[in-house]
Image (spheres, grey):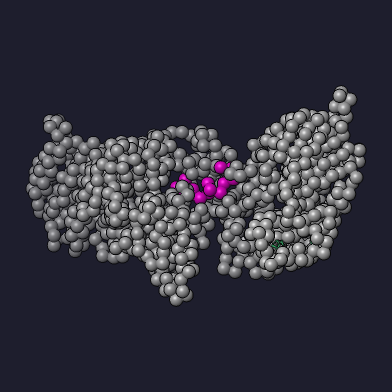
């Protein structure tokens, strides 16, 4: 049997699926969200090359979806597992979209007329824009199909949406189907790859930074969406309080990271990411001032140090060693950031017009539950545990189940891709060995 | 004890330069015999004898203290002796509550020509003190802890510091003076012991830095432990508060029940109210006999416990009061006098246990902190400890505390708003007009135990509109006067900053739950040209009920 299950359709899951499919394996790619793409789809550019993230990712997403050997199952989760390596039986719960995937062309007409249009936070834009109850996750979504939010749709929550549901009226193809029910699919696979990536930490617990209280304190992911031409502001850095373009931006590193109160590990991406973000700000607004307040700069890996040097010398980013202790909001929405300048051993303050918190990427929500279902383990932070951190980094504590990408631990895109390919190769090797033995 | 024949009391006499000292001198020159038990301290005027001097004498172990001055009308500074007389009355009352027989303190007028009278009063006093017996109080101020800074670094694990600077940039002291908790830790780790010892008294021990430290560095505990190893710091107000706490640690206190005359209190029961010491310091700031605004500080902080019992009575509660309650020991603990802190804590715990109470409620933020945290962590005190705002919240929810405020749901649950929604527009504006805007200051000791919501809940149920300062809840400011050791220019600036933030909110007054915050903030206000009203949380609630 040459069937493999991949859980999580981020860049790691996509890469592993493609590699296995190209080797002739049948891949079931189960993705929790309505579209594959993962976090990389939300990024504007990617360090260290400053490529447009979605531009390099979208072709892979489509290739994956269209691959004859890959079955992409979106809006679905793994709920049960039996058997053993070489012969697992997986139960997958596919939640209803309330839109017939076969009929829907993703024209978007329904989304324009929904009675709840503009009322609900858009997850893809991390709440910076609003969507309706029926929506298409994002322009380049794969599959590009509408989905109805069952917790918000009037028809699904109240049983009635005016005289006639607007979306039904709008859809020429009769794709909307309120009768869809959750569906359980049973899959027989030889091996499993877990690539569930990460979620974003809510920094409102760090009262010293006032996230949630101060409008102009945002997270790095919010920044990605703001600076992205495809984002809610069309790439204008309009600060939340008044839509003004900030004269300066202060990036605060390690928020909730390298912090014993929250997560002790280093996320391994924010140092470079902030440099990228500051470069992007400079590219959009040459006169903008950018400050990066860091604990220690961790620019490991190929081209990373050069990247930072470029940030400093070519773009004039100001790097200051010192983690701010408090932020105070002024009447006009500007923020006084207090920090100790380590080089000068002096307490100083900066008046920032926009503050970006480089918040911790944390293990995906539901990782513990998934580990329970799969019979594998998580480490103290909640990342999946590997069999041996040094010599078996992509194998989990259970035979036949593998991990790659951020789900295993902090890493950037190139590393996630490399690890995904490595995992695919390992899976292929092990499955073949099992076949021979059987 | 009093019957011991050999007992030779040690007496300290404060003699004014112009009359009594001259009188004592004359007694000597004239070879009048008087007992050798007296040590004389010459002061320029009996009015110069600060209550703190008297308490210090008792703390150090003197069996009797005598203040002597010129006869009324003869004072070389017109009325110094009148002030001494006023103060004497207050002092006797104070020492009695501290557990010292008031007869151990004596005031006498002796003129320069009354050498014989001097020897007579001394003789009489010595006899009287002999009859009472030796004082059981004798506190030496010697440093007992000899732990090295290096060992404290290991014990408190401050070497975990990752040198990020968060602590220094949130520290209020660092904003006004060249002080950095990060550097204190760094100096300790690198072994610059003197630098560490020199900076431990700059810290307010407000614990704000600990809240933000990503490495969980127990900075404040480290500083507190270092304080144990250095020469004891003296507090403002002539060490009066430390002396008084150390005396209580070594004496048999009593008399707190008397404070509550006219109110309903008990000696046994379920709920015990831990009063705190502030009624002892009624005369604080007025001991100089000057009629000025500082007067009101002592008055307003000392009535907090009375207001608290008044409210409890209104809600049908008759709280237990310990007649022999002692200082909770907060200040001694933070300056590192653990020996006397432990004595206080153990005595209080025993007394509480004897009362058969099941729950203890505190209105003073520092008492609350000590009972809730240190008593339980260090001495296994296991009763439930409540802050008074939590008790009031409970009483409101049970319908026992009713403010009769129009338009407010007394049962609370935050329904006040919904109700006004249903009302006509006019009613609504009326309601809003009636509400007094206030701002609430979260004192450090309540902040660090996360008492945020209960006081606000109670205040808004009592009909106040609570508006927030820039620094509130977890980020609240410190009143900069912890354990009375930090008073100075930096503290004043921090205090005025806090007042400034309160004024920005346009609140009618500032509410705090810590009598010390109130004291320090009022002191800063009175000493400046800003005008601001500050009230205790309990008093603000009691005033609504009156
Ligand atoms: C603000 C920010 C900026 C960044 N910028 C860069 C950059 O410029 N360059 C760079 O190289 N790296 C960057 N990174 C890092 C990069 O995002 C990650 O390395 C990369 O996304 C990891 O890919 P992944 O597939 O492992 O995880 P993800 O992208 O998180 O994908 C995981 C997928 O699994 C799905 N999933 C989760 N749980 C389940 C489940 N139980 N069942 C089914 N599916 C599930 C998720 O919905 C998601 O689609 C950045 C990170 C952040 C936070
Ligand atoms: S459901 Fe219908 S209207 Fe909506 S996107 Fe699909 S095809 Fe278009
Ligand atoms: S039924 Fe109504 S609320 Fe639901 S998606 Fe359609 S238009 Fe929106
Ligand atoms: S990568 Fe940089 S910002 Fe991110 S946790 Fe590590 S040191 Fe902090
Ligand atoms: S906040 Fe903590 S880790 Fe940072 S410098 Fe201060 S003590 Fe060290
Ligand atoms: S305890 Fe308070 S005063 Fe002391 S260093 Fe920390 S923040 Fe500063």
The residue drawn where x is 60% and y is 58% is A212
Residue found at the very far bottom of the displayed protein: B426
Q: Is residue B178 left or right of residue A36?
A: left
Residue A423 is drawn in which quadrant?
A: top right
The residue drawn where x is 35% and y is 61% is B403
Of A2 and B534, nearer the camera is A2
Of A263 and B75, nearer the camera is A263
Q: Quadrant of the C terminus of chain B?
A: bottom left
x, y percent for residue A336? 59, 61
Q: Is residue B283 left or right of residue B538?
A: left
Q: Quadrant of the N terminus of chain B?
A: top left
Magenta stretch in the rendered image: B200-216
x, y percent for residue B111? 12, 55
Of B43 and A35, nearer the camera is A35
The kind of secondary structure the magenta stretch mainly shows is loop
The residue drawn where x is 58% and y is 51% is A205
- Count of numbered tags: 0
């Amino acid at each position: 049997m040459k069937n493999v299950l991949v859980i999580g359709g981020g860049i790691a899951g996509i890469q592993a699926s493609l590699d296995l499919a190209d080797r002739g394996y049948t891949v079931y790619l189960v993705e929790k969200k309505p579209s594959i793409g993962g976090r990389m789809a939300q990024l504007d550019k990617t360090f260290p090359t400053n490529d447009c993230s979605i531009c390099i990712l979208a072709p892979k997403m489509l290739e994956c979806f269209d691959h004859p050997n890959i079955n992409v199952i979106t809006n679905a989760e793994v709920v049960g597992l039996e058997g053993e390596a070489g012969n697992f039986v997986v139960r997958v719960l596919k939640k209803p979209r309330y839109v017939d995937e076969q009929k829907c062309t993703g024209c978007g007409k329904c989304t324009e007329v929904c009675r709840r249009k503009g009322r609900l936070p858009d997850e893809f834009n991390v709440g910076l824009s609003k969507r309706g109850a029926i929506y298409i996750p994002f322009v380049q979504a794969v599959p590009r199909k509408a989905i109805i939010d069952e917790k918000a749709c009037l028809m699904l929550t109240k049983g009635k949406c005016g005289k006639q549901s607007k979306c039904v009226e709008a859809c020429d193809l009769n794709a909307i189907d309120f009768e869809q029910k959750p569906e359980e699919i049973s899959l027989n696979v030889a091996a499993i790859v877990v690539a569930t990536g990460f979620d974003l930490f809510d920094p409102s617990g760090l009262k010293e930074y006032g996230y949630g209280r101060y409008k102009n304190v945002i997270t790095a992911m919010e920044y990605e969406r703001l600076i992205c031409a495809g984002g809610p502001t069309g790439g204008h850095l309009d600060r939340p309080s008044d839509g003004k373009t900030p004269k300066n931006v202060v990036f605060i590193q390690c928020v909730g990271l390298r912090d014993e109160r929250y997560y002790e590990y280093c996320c391994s991406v924010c140092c470079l990411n902030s440099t990228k973000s500051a470069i992007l700000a400079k590219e959009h607004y040459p006169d903008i001032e950018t400050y990066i307040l860091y604990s220690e700069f961790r620019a490991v890996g190929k081209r990373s140090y050069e990247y930072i040097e470029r940030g400093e010398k070519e773009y004039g980013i100001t790097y200051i060693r010192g983690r701010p202790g408090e932020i105070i909001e002024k009447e006009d929405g500007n923020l006084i950031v207090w920090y100790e300048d380590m080089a000068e051993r002096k307490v100083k303050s900066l008046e920032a017009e926009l503050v970006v918190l480089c918040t911790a990427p944390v293990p995906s929500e539901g990782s513990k539950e998934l580990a329970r279902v799969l019979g594998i383990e998580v480490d103290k932070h909640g990342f999946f545990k590997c069999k041996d951190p040094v010599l078996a980094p992509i194998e989990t504590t259970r035979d036949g189940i593998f991990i790659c990408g951020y789900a295993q631990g902090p890493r950037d895109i190139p590393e996630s891709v490399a690890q995904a390919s490595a995992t695919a190769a390992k899976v292929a090797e092990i499955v073949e060995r099992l076949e021979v033995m059987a | 004890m009093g019957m011991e024949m050999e007992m030779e009391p040690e007496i300290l006499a404060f003699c004014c330069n112009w009359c009594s000292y001259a009188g004592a001198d004359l007694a000597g020159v004239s070879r009048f015999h008087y007992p050798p038990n007296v040590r004389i301290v010459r002061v320029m005027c009996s009015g110069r004898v600060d209550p703190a001097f008297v308490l210090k004498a008792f703390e150090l172990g003197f069996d009797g203290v005598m203040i002597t001055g010129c006869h009324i009308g003869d004072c070389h500074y017109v009325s110094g002796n009148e002030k001494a007389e006023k103060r004497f009355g207050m002092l006797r009352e104070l020492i009695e509550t501290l557990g010292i027989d008031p007869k151990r303190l004596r005031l006498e007028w002796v003129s320069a020509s009354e050498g014989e009278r001097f020897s007579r009063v001394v003789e009489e006093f010595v006899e009287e003190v002999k009859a009472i017996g030796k004082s059981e109080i004798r506190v030496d101020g010697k440093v007992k802890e000899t732990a090295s800074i290096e060992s404290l670094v290991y014990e408190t694990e401050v070497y975990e510091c990752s040198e990020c600077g968060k602590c220094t940039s949130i520290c209020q002291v660092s904003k006004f003076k060249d002080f950095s908790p990060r550097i204190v830790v760094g100096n300790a780790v690198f072994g610059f012991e003197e630098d560490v010892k020199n900076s431990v008294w700059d810290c307010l021990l407000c614990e704000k830095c600990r809240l933000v430290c990503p490495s969980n560095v127990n900075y404040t505990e480290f500083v507190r432990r270092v304080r144990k190893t250095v020469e004891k710091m003296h507090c403002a107000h002539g060490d009066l508060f430390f002396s008084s706490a150390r005396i209580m640690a070594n004496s048999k206190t009593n008399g707190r029940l008397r404070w509550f005359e006219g109110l309903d209190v008990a000696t046994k029961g379920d709920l015990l109210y831990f009063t705190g010491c502030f009624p002892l310091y009624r005369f604080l700031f007025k001991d100089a006999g000057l009629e000025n605004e500082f007067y009101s500080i002592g008055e307003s902080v000392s009535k907090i416990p009375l207001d608290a019992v008044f409210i409890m009575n209104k809600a049908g509660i008759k709280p237990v009061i310990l007649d022999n309650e002692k200082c909770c020991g907060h200040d001694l603990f933070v300056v590192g006098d653990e020996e006397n802190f432990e004595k206080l804590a153990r005595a209080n715990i025993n007394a509480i246990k004897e009362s058969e109470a099941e729950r203890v409620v505190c209105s003073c933020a520092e008492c609350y902190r000590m009972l809730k945290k240190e008593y339980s962590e260090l001495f296994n005190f296991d009763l439930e400890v409540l802050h008074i705002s939590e008790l009031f919240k409970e009483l409101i929810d049970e319908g026992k505390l009713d403010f009769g405020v129009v338009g407010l749901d007394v049962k609370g649950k935050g329904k006040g708003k919904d109700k006004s929604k249903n009302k006509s527009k006019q009613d609504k504006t009326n309601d809003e007009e009636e509400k007094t805007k206030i701002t609430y200051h979260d004192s450090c000791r309540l902040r660090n135990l996360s008492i945020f919501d209960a006081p606000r809940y109670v205040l808004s149920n009592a009909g106040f509109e609570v508006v927030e300062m820039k620094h509130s809840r977890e980020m609240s400011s410190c009143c900069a006067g912890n354990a009375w050791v930090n008073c100075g220019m930096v503290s004043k600036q921090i205090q005025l900053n806090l007042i400034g933030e309160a004024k920005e909110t346009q609140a009618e007054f500032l509410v705090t739950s810590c009598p010390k915050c109130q004291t320090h903030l009022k002191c800063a206000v009175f000493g400046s040209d800003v005008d601001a009203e500050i009230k205790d949380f309990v008093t603000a609630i009691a005033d609504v009920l009156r």
